[in-house]
Amino acid sequence: MLNHFNRDTGNIVVLTGAGISAESGLKTFRDNNGLWENHRVEEVATPEAFAANPELVYRFYNVRRQQLLSDEVQPNAAHFALAELEQALGSRLTIVTQNVDNLHERAGNKNVIHMHGELTKVKCVKTGESIFTNKDIDEQTQCACCNPAQRMRPDIVWFGEMPYEMDRIEELLYNAELFVSIGTSGNVYPAAGFVRAASQFGAYCVELNLEPSAGSRLFDETKHGPATQVVSEFVRSLV
Ligand code: OAD
């Protein structure tokens, strides 16, 4: 792999999914018979669910946010290893994460794209203007951008909605010498298609996951094991 990456000039795109945060105590999506914290995805992660039962959806993300900000959830060795990699490579490393947690930032990474939104942000239902919050929100929470004020919603990309910053991500994939996918099952597009794009653009592609993902055969190299172990080893081999 080192033959495929120039440490002095190469760009890396790291795609992360729920698996990198599993050892921090956050549940992945497709464990537990496809239930996410005891809910079917369609109950809590679609615009239709929000329209039909806003109270449930607000409560669901309030609980996720409280859990994320509790002392029990901390970045793990895999997050810290990627922070070390950013220290070594600076802006040549970009993390594109499907995760809505803030564990990459808390480990020290700055160059992070949250393509599926963030638990610590909420946005106006009308303008989409997004603000930071560490508090619960509900139907009474109002935006500051409209007159009359509008409702706020979790700043999460739900199924059927367009992920954020796709143009920028495509450009990063185009310029990447190395593409590394960590802790994602490869079931949800467009992220699941990044390996194919990166590969076509000429990047060397590495998968680090507990088990082979849906697109495992598309990678040039795979390492299977817990993220705290395989990501730390991988970063050590690079810097
Ligand atoms: P998934 O739950 O689909 O997949 C998690 C992957 O992580 C699986 O392949 C597990 O084998 C692996 N895994 C579990 N524990 C691990 C560990 N300790 N170390 C390494 N790997 C581990 O989660 P995502 O692929 O992130 O979208 O799911 C993609 C998207 O689907 C999410 O962003 C979310 C969801 O619905 C939205 O909310 C829009």
Image: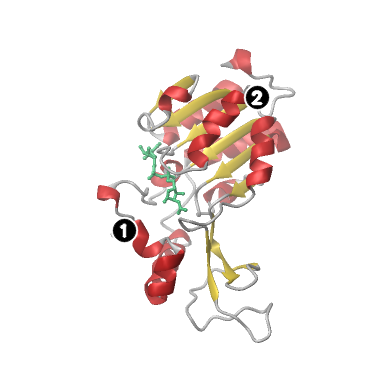
Identify the residue under disc 2: 177
Residue 207: image tag = none
Residue 134, x across and y down, in percent:
54, 68
Kindly state the secondary structure of the residue where label 2 is placed. Answer: loop
Looking at the image, residue 65 lies above or below residue 16? below
Residue kind at label 1, given as amino acid type = Arg
Q: For the residues carrying marks 2 and 1, which lies nearer the camera in this image?
A: 1
Q: State whether residue 206 appears in this view.
A: yes
Gap between marks 2 and 1 measured at Cα: 38 Å
Ligand 1 positioned in quadrant: top left
Residue 133, x across and y down, in percent:
57, 69
Q: Residue at x 43, y 35 (%)?
A: 227
Residue kind at label 2, given as amino acid type = Glu
Q: Residue at x 62, y 47 (%)?
A: 113
Compare residues 93 and 70 and report the one nearer the observer.
93
Rendered-image quadrant of the N terminus? top right
